[in-house]
Image (cartoon, rainbow, N blue to C red):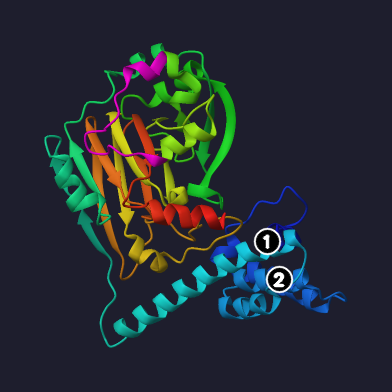
Amino acid sequence: RLRHEVLQDICGQPPVIPQLSLLQRPKSAMDRLDATEAALRAGAVKGAFEEAKLASLLDLKGQHLDAQDILKRCAAMGTTEERAAMGLLEHLVHRHVCWQEEREKISKTTSRGDEAKQTVKPVEVLSAQVSREEVWRRFIEPGIPCVLRGVQLAPFRNLRDVTTTVGKVKVPIRRCDESSANWARLEFDRVVHFDDFVTEFIQPYEHGLAAPRNSPQLFDFSIWQQCAESLGNQLFMPSKWFPVDLYTYASAQMQPVSGSACPTLFVAPCGSGSSLHVDTLQTNFWMFMSLGRKRWRLVSKDQIALLHPQYFCDLNPVFPEDLNVVKPNVTIYETELEAGDLIFVPAGWPHQVDNLETSVAISANFIDTSNVHRCIEEADIM
């Protein structure tokens, strides 16, 4: 609520959409922030909630320590609802302060004549014959990405197989809008029948022609909730390597009728993609490529501060730039997924995906003992 009200003051009338310019901070955006700050400071009423709104605005301006000081003064003040809103904002500001301190520490260590460079490393690729124990010991427990090659989870041989199976199911399609401040910069486009979506937006790019970056795509569409009867019995889960999934179990307990959203379906034309983002709730993630190719780029959660993330209204960080812009001191892990590949993405790792060919993929978020405590902490804040 706090952030929404401040963004409304800055960006105009509802529906309020956080503008990416507030994070990139050009002069025009800073002028708007300065004007809103002046109006807040000139206000006649100075209750705890108004003070917290000022803290929220200062946080958006990058003055995180000042925002933190104001919120400390407002602690335990206001109504129950206002305290809850201020509590969430305090968590967001605290993370911004920590990231700022990390950047300052790194800046001091690299300012002694050392040239700050970006490093690119390949994601390690293993045979699907690798044991569960090795995957756990080397990758899941320490939180390191990997690719398993030669996996068989879905029977699709071509796009026609997918269309025949899913058919007339209505699906929400989304576009990647580079000016958006949404998660992964994805904006809802419309709801269409799956076969119409394939005919209009996928088939024209099936043989290598690249679609515009902002072309519609089916992104993270629930299989169990929407097409379990037609598709669910054709899929296998990668339980050989990921035998524990507390996320699916908890979702099924909370939604016994619809069940868990995972696994989910991705269908996208060549040339499309999603921008830099972190999966919600500190969940682990896997994706299996059934058809096509995807380029994956990832950054360790330990270097997220160097990407200058900012929280707007929830715990999904927004990034001012994607990984196409060089990031000094950052190591980017990169791989190209092909049909039969499965990638494991550890909790908290920012990642960006480009569809190098028209692609079909299956995925799921999951929680096990490697990330359950972080997931609980994140859920408690929310």
Residue 134: mark: none
The crowd level at tag 2 (other Cα within 10 Å; few <14, some 14-19, many 20+) is many
Residue drawn at x 83%, y 78% is 42
Residue 239 picture location, percent across and down: 26, 33
- Of circles 2 and 1, the one toward us is 1
Which quarter of the rendering shows the N terminus? bottom right
> Can residue 215 be spotted in the picture?
no
Task: Tell me if residue 171 is in the magenta stretch.
Answer: no
| Relative depth, front residue between 348 and 20 | 348
| Relative depth, front residue between 275 and 265 | 265
- Tag 1's secondary structure? helix
> Can residue 207 be spotted in the picture?
yes
Residue underneath mark 1:
85
Q: Residue furthest bottom?
A: 112
In the displayed structure, 252 sits above or below 163; it is: below
Task: Tell me if residue 241 is in the magenta stretch.
Answer: yes
* Amino acid carrying mark 2 in the image: Ala
Residue underneath mark 2:
52
Part of the protein shown in magenta:
230-246
Q: Residue furthest right?
A: 44
Quarter where residue 106 is shown: bottom left
Asked whether, in this view, residue 132 is left or right of residue 67, the answer is: left
In the displayed structure, 304 sits above or below 74; it is: above
| Relative depth, front residue between 275 and 207 | 275
The crowd level at tag 1 (other Cα within 10 Å; few <14, some 14-19, many 20+) is some
Q: Counting residues from the N terminus, which is met first, the one under dot 2 or under dot 1?
A: 2
In the displayed structure, 133 sits above or below 292; it is: below
Q: Circles 2 and 1: CB distance less than 8 Å?
A: yes
